[in-house]
Image (tube, rainbow, N blue to C red):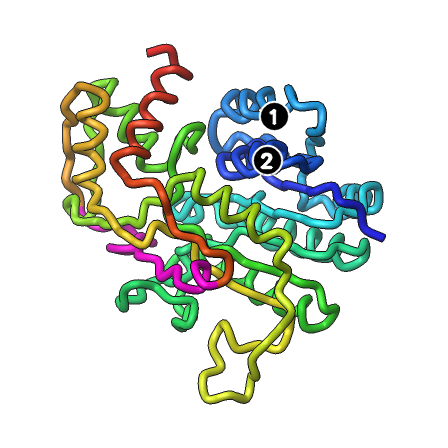
Amino acid sequence: MASKVVLVTGAAGFIGFHVSQRLLSEGFDVVGVDNINHYYDPKLKGARLDVLKSNSRFCTEKLDLAHRQMTKALFERHRFGKVIHLAAQAGVRYSIQDPHAYVDANMQGFVNVLEGCRHNGCEHLVYASSSSVYGANTKLPFSIEDRVDHPISLYAASKRANELMAHAYSHLYRLPTTGLRFFTVYGPWGRPDMAMFVFARSILAGEPIKLFNHGKMRRDFTYVDDVSKCIVGLIDRAPQGFGDLSSDKPGTSATSVPWRIYNIGNNNPEELTYVVSLLEKELGKAAIREMLPMQPGDVEATYADVKDLEQDIGFRPATQIEEGVARFVKWYRDYYRI
Protein backbone atom coordinates (compact mmCIF):
# COMPACT_ATOMS: atom_id res chain seq x y z
CA MET A 1 0.00 0.00 0.00
CA ALA A 2 1.36 3.43 -0.94
CA SER A 3 2.32 5.77 1.86
CA LYS A 4 0.66 9.13 2.47
CA VAL A 5 3.91 11.05 2.10
CA VAL A 6 3.74 13.56 -0.77
CA LEU A 7 6.66 13.92 -3.15
CA VAL A 8 7.19 17.44 -4.48
CA THR A 9 9.77 17.60 -7.25
CA GLY A 10 11.33 20.99 -7.86
CA ALA A 11 10.73 21.82 -4.19
CA ALA A 12 13.49 24.45 -4.21
CA GLY A 13 11.80 26.15 -7.15
CA PHE A 14 9.27 28.96 -7.02
CA ILE A 15 5.99 27.05 -7.25
CA GLY A 16 7.40 23.94 -5.58
CA PHE A 17 8.40 25.98 -2.53
CA HIS A 18 4.92 27.46 -2.13
CA VAL A 19 3.18 24.13 -2.72
CA SER A 20 5.42 22.46 -0.13
CA GLN A 21 4.63 25.21 2.39
CA ARG A 22 0.90 24.78 1.86
CA LEU A 23 1.09 20.99 2.14
CA LEU A 24 3.00 21.29 5.41
CA SER A 25 0.51 23.82 6.76
CA GLU A 26 -2.30 21.35 6.02
CA GLY A 27 -0.61 18.50 7.87
CA PHE A 28 1.04 16.55 5.06
CA ASP A 29 4.52 15.03 5.26
CA VAL A 30 6.63 16.20 2.31
CA VAL A 31 9.73 14.86 0.60
CA GLY A 32 11.19 17.62 -1.56
CA VAL A 33 13.50 16.78 -4.46
CA ASP A 34 15.57 19.25 -6.47
CA ASN A 35 18.85 19.20 -8.37
CA ILE A 36 19.64 22.86 -7.48
CA ASN A 37 20.89 23.64 -10.97
CA HIS A 38 22.40 26.96 -12.00
CA TYR A 39 19.68 28.15 -14.39
CA TYR A 40 19.22 30.93 -11.84
CA ASP A 41 20.79 31.84 -8.49
CA PRO A 42 21.20 28.65 -6.41
CA LYS A 43 21.36 30.82 -3.26
CA LEU A 44 17.70 31.73 -3.73
CA LYS A 45 16.84 28.04 -4.07
CA GLY A 46 18.85 27.29 -0.93
CA ALA A 47 17.04 30.04 0.98
CA ARG A 48 13.69 28.53 0.03
CA LEU A 49 14.84 25.11 1.24
CA ASP A 50 16.05 26.61 4.51
CA VAL A 51 12.54 27.89 5.17
CA LEU A 52 11.02 24.50 4.39
CA LYS A 53 13.57 22.58 6.48
CA SER A 54 12.47 24.50 9.58
CA ASN A 55 9.44 22.17 9.55
CA SER A 56 10.20 18.70 10.92
CA ARG A 57 7.75 17.06 8.48
CA PHE A 58 9.82 18.18 5.50
CA CYS A 59 12.89 16.37 4.25
CA THR A 60 14.85 17.07 1.11
CA GLU A 61 17.00 15.10 -1.30
CA LYS A 62 19.28 16.55 -3.96
CA LEU A 63 18.58 14.53 -7.08
CA ASP A 64 18.57 14.92 -10.84
CA LEU A 65 15.41 13.15 -12.00
CA ALA A 66 17.01 12.50 -15.40
CA HIS A 67 19.20 9.94 -13.59
CA ARG A 68 17.19 6.76 -14.08
CA GLN A 69 18.57 4.53 -11.34
CA MET A 70 18.61 7.22 -8.64
CA THR A 71 15.02 8.18 -9.42
CA LYS A 72 13.98 4.52 -9.38
CA ALA A 73 15.60 4.11 -5.95
CA LEU A 74 13.84 7.23 -4.61
CA PHE A 75 10.42 5.85 -5.49
CA GLU A 76 11.23 2.39 -4.17
CA ARG A 77 12.34 3.85 -0.82
CA HIS A 78 9.25 5.95 -0.21
CA ARG A 79 6.42 4.48 -2.32
CA PHE A 80 4.72 7.87 -2.49
CA GLY A 81 0.93 7.95 -2.39
CA LYS A 82 0.76 11.31 -4.15
CA VAL A 83 3.33 12.97 -6.42
CA ILE A 84 3.40 16.64 -7.41
CA HIS A 85 5.92 16.92 -10.24
CA LEU A 86 7.02 20.54 -10.71
CA ALA A 87 10.70 20.01 -11.57
CA ALA A 88 11.54 21.09 -15.11
CA GLN A 89 13.90 23.14 -17.19
CA ALA A 90 11.88 26.33 -17.50
CA GLY A 91 12.07 29.26 -19.88
CA VAL A 92 10.87 29.78 -23.43
CA ARG A 93 13.83 31.85 -24.61
CA TYR A 94 16.48 29.67 -22.97
CA SER A 95 15.12 26.64 -24.86
CA ILE A 96 16.42 28.26 -28.05
CA GLN A 97 19.92 28.52 -26.52
CA ASP A 98 20.17 25.07 -24.90
CA PRO A 99 17.62 22.59 -26.30
CA HIS A 100 19.35 19.56 -24.80
CA ALA A 101 18.60 20.78 -21.27
CA TYR A 102 14.88 20.48 -22.07
CA VAL A 103 15.18 16.95 -23.42
CA ASP A 104 17.09 15.83 -20.32
CA ALA A 105 14.93 17.49 -17.66
CA ASN A 106 11.50 17.67 -19.26
CA MET A 107 11.47 14.44 -21.25
CA GLN A 108 13.87 11.98 -19.62
CA GLY A 109 13.09 13.26 -16.14
CA PHE A 110 9.36 12.98 -16.74
CA VAL A 111 9.40 9.41 -18.02
CA ASN A 112 11.49 8.43 -14.98
CA VAL A 113 8.82 9.95 -12.73
CA LEU A 114 6.07 8.15 -14.66
CA GLU A 115 7.90 4.86 -14.25
CA GLY A 116 8.41 5.50 -10.54
CA CYS A 117 4.71 6.19 -10.09
CA ARG A 118 3.70 3.17 -12.18
CA HIS A 119 5.78 0.64 -10.27
CA ASN A 120 5.27 1.91 -6.72
CA GLY A 121 1.55 2.31 -6.16
CA CYS A 122 1.14 6.04 -6.76
CA GLU A 123 -2.53 7.02 -6.42
CA HIS A 124 -2.28 10.34 -8.27
CA LEU A 125 0.40 12.20 -10.23
CA VAL A 126 -0.12 15.96 -10.57
CA TYR A 127 2.39 17.56 -12.92
CA ALA A 128 3.26 20.96 -14.37
CA SER A 129 2.44 21.73 -17.96
CA SER A 130 2.39 25.28 -19.33
CA SER A 131 0.23 27.81 -21.12
CA SER A 132 2.98 27.82 -23.75
CA VAL A 133 1.43 24.67 -25.25
CA TYR A 134 -1.21 26.92 -26.86
CA GLY A 135 1.52 28.25 -29.17
CA ALA A 136 0.28 30.76 -31.70
CA ASN A 137 -3.43 30.18 -30.94
CA THR A 138 -5.35 33.42 -31.48
CA LYS A 139 -8.71 32.43 -29.98
CA LEU A 140 -9.02 33.89 -26.49
CA PRO A 141 -9.43 32.80 -23.77
CA PHE A 142 -7.40 29.62 -24.18
CA SER A 143 -9.54 26.57 -23.49
CA ILE A 144 -8.42 23.04 -22.69
CA GLU A 145 -10.60 21.99 -25.62
CA ASP A 146 -8.45 23.99 -28.07
CA ARG A 147 -6.07 22.11 -30.35
CA VAL A 148 -2.46 22.47 -29.25
CA ASP A 149 -0.61 20.99 -32.21
CA HIS A 150 1.60 23.96 -33.11
CA PRO A 151 4.18 24.74 -30.39
CA ILE A 152 6.50 27.63 -31.21
CA SER A 153 9.33 26.77 -28.80
CA LEU A 154 11.02 23.56 -27.70
CA TYR A 155 9.95 24.31 -24.13
CA ALA A 156 6.31 24.30 -25.26
CA ALA A 157 6.85 21.12 -27.26
CA SER A 158 8.37 19.38 -24.23
CA LYS A 159 5.40 20.34 -22.06
CA ARG A 160 2.90 19.12 -24.64
CA ALA A 161 4.89 15.90 -24.89
CA ASN A 162 4.52 15.50 -21.10
CA GLU A 163 0.74 15.69 -21.44
CA LEU A 164 0.76 13.00 -24.12
CA MET A 165 3.19 10.78 -22.20
CA ALA A 166 0.95 11.05 -19.13
CA HIS A 167 -2.06 10.06 -21.24
CA ALA A 168 -0.23 6.97 -22.46
CA TYR A 169 0.56 5.88 -18.89
CA SER A 170 -2.99 6.64 -17.75
CA HIS A 171 -4.28 4.49 -20.61
CA LEU A 172 -1.82 1.62 -20.30
CA TYR A 173 -1.52 1.36 -16.51
CA ARG A 174 -4.58 3.25 -15.19
CA LEU A 175 -2.23 5.71 -13.47
CA PRO A 176 -4.33 8.78 -12.56
CA THR A 177 -2.60 11.92 -13.88
CA THR A 178 -3.55 15.60 -13.82
CA GLY A 179 -1.65 18.15 -15.91
CA LEU A 180 -1.70 21.84 -15.03
CA ARG A 181 -1.17 24.53 -17.65
CA PHE A 182 0.24 27.43 -15.62
CA PHE A 183 -0.26 31.01 -16.78
CA THR A 184 2.52 33.47 -15.76
CA VAL A 185 2.77 32.69 -12.06
CA TYR A 186 4.25 35.49 -9.92
CA GLY A 187 4.65 36.50 -6.29
CA PRO A 188 7.12 36.39 -3.35
CA TRP A 189 10.12 34.08 -3.80
CA GLY A 190 9.61 34.29 -7.58
CA ARG A 191 11.98 33.29 -10.36
CA PRO A 192 14.65 35.87 -11.29
CA ASP A 193 14.25 35.11 -15.00
CA MET A 194 10.56 36.07 -15.07
CA ALA A 195 9.19 39.48 -16.03
CA MET A 196 8.09 40.71 -12.60
CA PHE A 197 11.50 39.99 -11.06
CA VAL A 198 13.46 41.31 -14.03
CA PHE A 199 11.46 44.55 -14.13
CA ALA A 200 11.84 45.21 -10.39
CA ARG A 201 15.58 44.60 -10.47
CA SER A 202 16.08 46.84 -13.51
CA ILE A 203 13.92 49.67 -12.18
CA LEU A 204 15.85 49.78 -8.90
CA ALA A 205 19.19 49.61 -10.74
CA GLY A 206 18.21 52.42 -13.12
CA GLU A 207 18.61 50.08 -16.10
CA PRO A 208 16.26 49.91 -19.10
CA ILE A 209 13.53 47.30 -19.06
CA LYS A 210 12.88 45.52 -22.34
CA LEU A 211 9.23 45.59 -23.39
CA PHE A 212 8.75 43.30 -26.37
CA ASN A 213 6.02 43.83 -28.94
CA HIS A 214 6.46 47.52 -28.04
CA GLY A 215 4.84 46.97 -24.66
CA LYS A 216 1.65 45.47 -26.06
CA MET A 217 2.20 41.99 -24.63
CA ARG A 218 -0.62 40.77 -22.39
CA ARG A 219 -0.19 38.06 -19.78
CA ASP A 220 -2.61 36.29 -17.48
CA PHE A 221 -0.59 37.01 -14.32
CA THR A 222 -1.55 34.44 -11.66
CA TYR A 223 -0.62 34.92 -8.01
CA VAL A 224 1.32 32.03 -6.53
CA ASP A 225 -0.92 31.56 -3.47
CA ASP A 226 -3.90 30.99 -5.75
CA VAL A 227 -1.83 28.42 -7.65
CA SER A 228 -0.63 26.51 -4.58
CA LYS A 229 -4.14 26.42 -3.11
CA CYS A 230 -5.44 24.97 -6.36
CA ILE A 231 -2.72 22.30 -6.62
CA VAL A 232 -3.19 21.09 -3.05
CA GLY A 233 -6.94 21.07 -3.63
CA LEU A 234 -6.48 18.71 -6.54
CA ILE A 235 -4.21 16.04 -5.06
CA ASP A 236 -7.09 14.10 -3.48
CA ARG A 237 -9.22 14.42 -6.63
CA ALA A 238 -7.63 11.84 -8.89
CA PRO A 239 -9.39 11.65 -12.28
CA GLN A 240 -11.49 8.55 -12.82
CA GLY A 241 -11.86 8.71 -16.60
CA PHE A 242 -15.03 9.80 -18.30
CA GLY A 243 -16.35 10.72 -21.71
CA ASP A 244 -16.07 8.77 -24.93
CA LEU A 245 -13.27 9.15 -27.43
CA SER A 246 -15.73 8.32 -30.21
CA SER A 247 -17.99 11.25 -29.30
CA ASP A 248 -18.66 14.21 -31.57
CA LYS A 249 -16.27 16.36 -29.48
CA PRO A 250 -13.18 14.26 -28.74
CA GLY A 251 -11.39 17.08 -26.89
CA THR A 252 -9.26 17.10 -23.78
CA SER A 253 -12.22 16.42 -21.50
CA ALA A 254 -13.45 13.46 -23.55
CA THR A 255 -11.32 10.53 -22.49
CA SER A 256 -12.17 7.28 -20.79
CA VAL A 257 -8.80 7.04 -19.04
CA PRO A 258 -7.94 8.64 -15.66
CA TRP A 259 -6.23 11.67 -17.22
CA ARG A 260 -7.10 15.35 -16.87
CA ILE A 261 -5.79 18.73 -17.98
CA TYR A 262 -6.59 22.08 -16.36
CA ASN A 263 -5.67 25.70 -16.97
CA ILE A 264 -4.49 27.57 -13.87
CA GLY A 265 -4.72 31.26 -14.63
CA ASN A 266 -6.11 34.52 -13.36
CA ASN A 267 -8.74 34.67 -16.14
CA ASN A 268 -7.87 38.35 -16.61
CA PRO A 269 -4.86 39.26 -18.79
CA GLU A 270 -2.92 42.45 -18.05
CA GLU A 271 -0.80 44.51 -20.43
CA LEU A 272 2.85 44.55 -19.39
CA THR A 273 2.91 48.35 -19.42
CA TYR A 274 0.27 48.36 -16.66
CA VAL A 275 2.29 45.89 -14.58
CA VAL A 276 5.34 48.13 -15.00
CA SER A 277 3.31 51.11 -13.77
CA LEU A 278 2.30 49.15 -10.64
CA LEU A 279 5.94 48.26 -9.98
CA GLU A 280 6.93 51.91 -10.41
CA LYS A 281 4.33 52.90 -7.82
CA GLU A 282 5.38 50.28 -5.27
CA LEU A 283 9.11 50.85 -5.79
CA GLY A 284 8.80 54.63 -5.86
CA LYS A 285 10.94 54.92 -8.96
CA ALA A 286 10.26 55.39 -12.67
CA ALA A 287 11.26 52.76 -15.20
CA ILE A 288 13.39 53.35 -18.27
CA ARG A 289 11.38 51.64 -21.01
CA GLU A 290 13.02 50.13 -24.06
CA MET A 291 10.41 49.21 -26.68
CA LEU A 292 11.37 46.22 -28.82
CA PRO A 293 9.71 43.97 -31.44
CA MET A 294 8.44 40.45 -30.69
CA GLN A 295 11.02 37.78 -29.90
CA PRO A 296 11.06 34.28 -31.42
CA GLY A 297 9.05 31.84 -29.33
CA ASP A 298 6.90 34.52 -27.65
CA VAL A 299 3.15 34.95 -28.00
CA GLU A 300 1.33 38.28 -27.87
CA ALA A 301 -1.30 37.34 -25.29
CA THR A 302 -2.21 34.60 -22.83
CA TYR A 303 -5.64 34.29 -21.26
CA ALA A 304 -6.90 31.25 -19.34
CA ASP A 305 -10.38 29.78 -19.46
CA VAL A 306 -10.67 28.26 -15.95
CA LYS A 307 -14.30 27.13 -15.96
CA ASP A 308 -13.33 23.45 -15.55
CA LEU A 309 -11.39 24.18 -12.37
CA GLU A 310 -14.23 26.33 -11.07
CA GLN A 311 -16.68 23.53 -11.76
CA ASP A 312 -14.57 20.72 -10.28
CA ILE A 313 -13.04 22.30 -7.16
CA GLY A 314 -14.63 25.76 -6.94
CA PHE A 315 -11.41 27.50 -7.97
CA ARG A 316 -11.55 31.21 -8.65
CA PRO A 317 -8.40 33.37 -8.56
CA ALA A 318 -8.67 35.60 -5.49
CA THR A 319 -5.68 37.95 -5.79
CA GLN A 320 -5.93 41.11 -7.87
CA ILE A 321 -2.80 42.19 -9.74
CA GLU A 322 -2.47 45.37 -7.65
CA GLU A 323 -2.40 43.40 -4.40
CA GLY A 324 -0.11 40.73 -5.81
CA VAL A 325 2.47 43.24 -7.08
CA ALA A 326 2.48 45.00 -3.70
CA ARG A 327 3.15 41.69 -1.90
CA PHE A 328 5.90 40.78 -4.36
CA VAL A 329 7.66 44.14 -3.91
CA LYS A 330 7.46 43.86 -0.12
CA TRP A 331 9.13 40.43 -0.26
CA TYR A 332 11.72 41.70 -2.76
CA ARG A 333 12.69 44.59 -0.48
CA ASP A 334 12.89 42.33 2.56
CA TYR A 335 14.87 39.56 0.87
CA TYR A 336 17.43 41.88 -0.74
CA ARG A 337 17.43 44.28 2.22
CA ILE A 338 16.47 47.29 0.10
Quick check: is 295 in the magenta stretch?
yes
Question: Three-letter amino acid code at disc 2?
Answer: Ser
Quick check: is 237 in the magenta stretch?
no
Q: Quadrant of the C terminus?
A: top left
Mark 2 or mark 1: name the one nearer the start of the chain. Answer: 2
Give percent across and percent down for residue 245.
Answer: 56, 83
Question: Three-letter amino acid code at disc 1?
Answer: Leu
- Give the Cα separation between the discs numbered 2 and 1: 7 Å
SS label for mark 1: helix
Using a 10 Å C-alpha cutoff, classify the residue at mark 1 as few (fewer than 14 neighbours), some (14 to 19) or many (20 or more).
Answer: many
Residue 298: which disc?
none
Relative to residue 4, is residue 281 depicted above or below?
Answer: above
Q: Residue at x 26, y 55 (%)?
A: 301
Give percent across and percent down for residue 285.
Answer: 17, 20
Q: Is residue 154 visible?
A: no
Relative to residue 12, is residue 310 depicted above or below?
Answer: below
Dividing the picture into quarters, in which one does residue 333 lie? top left
Residue 52: which disc?
1
Q: How many marks?
A: 2
SS label for mark 2: helix
Q: Residue at x 67, y 68 (%)?
A: 170
Question: Which segment is the magenta one?
Answer: 293-311
Using a 10 Å C-alpha cutoff, classify the residue at mark 2 as few (fewer than 14 neighbours), some (14 to 19) or many (20 or more).
Answer: many
Residue 20: which disc?
2
Is 289 on the left-hand or right-hand side of 119? left
User: Would you say the residues marked 2 and 1 are in contact, meaning their CB atoms lie under 8 Å apart?
Assistant: yes
